[in-house]
Image (spheres, grey):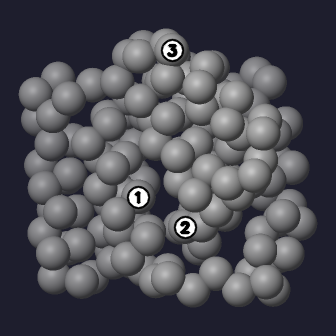
Amino acid sequence: MPEKSLNEIPRPLRDQFEKGNAAAHRDNLEYALTIYTEVLNKEPAFYACREALRAAQIKKSGKSSGFFKKMIGSANPMLVKGQMALRNHPAEAMSIAEQMLNSDANNASAHKLLAEGALACDLPKTAIMSLEIARKHAPKDRDLAIKLAQASVLT
């Protein structure tokens, strides 16, 4: 299932997406995150919504990414749940990764999980977006660079 544009999405989801955009524009980020997450749960291939969600997550979390936050992120029990879901239900793993990113938009482990789920669902643009963000936070990670290159070949 390749990524879908706004015109390929059913009308009710488009309306919901527009409500999320309005909420994000008013800086009601929690509400926007909730709406975007609901839309992506129903239509995981909606790329514009994923971009809007990522922008809202980054805006909400700000630029702070301290050592303590990174340590908590790598020991998150949701990460284990997501990795288990990745084997049989990659779309569910993507949803779990998005929940993790709602609380910490810079969580490299969640971005890796999201990218693996996206590749399993044949969503290479989504995988590239997450891998690029993870690469910014871990520029020396060789495996991450290889995954990014492999995903780039698929587009």
- Residue 150 in view: yes
Residue of label 2: 105
Taking 50 as reference, is 42 above or below it? above
Amino acid type shown at disc 3: Val
Tally of numbered tags: 3
Amino acid type shown at disc 2: Ala
Residue of label 3: 153
Is residue 23 shown left or right of residue 117? left
The residue nearer to you, when weighing 17 against 101, is 101
Is residue 88 shown left or right of residue 6? right
Residue 65 screen position, x and y as percent: 64, 81
Tell me if mark 3 has few (under 14), some (14-19) or many (20+) residues whose alpha carbon lies within 10 angstroms of its own. Answer: few
Residue 84 screen position, x and y as percent: 85, 36
Residue shown at 46% from the left, 83% from the top? 62
Taking 32 as reference, is 93 above or below it? above
Residue of label 1: 54
As drawn, the label of residue 128 is none
Tell me the CA gap for discs 1 and 2: 7 Å
Tell me the CA gap for discs 2 and 3: 26 Å
Upstream in the sequence, badge 1 or badge 2? Answer: 1
Q: Work out which residue is located at the far front of the displayed protein and give it.
A: 140
- Residue 96 in view: no
Q: Are marks 1 and 2 in contact (CB under 8 Å)?
A: yes
Amino acid type shown at disc 1: Arg
In the figure, residue 45 lies in which quadrant?
A: top left
Q: Identify the secondary structure beneath mark 3.
A: helix
Residue shown at 75% from the left, 31% from the top? 86
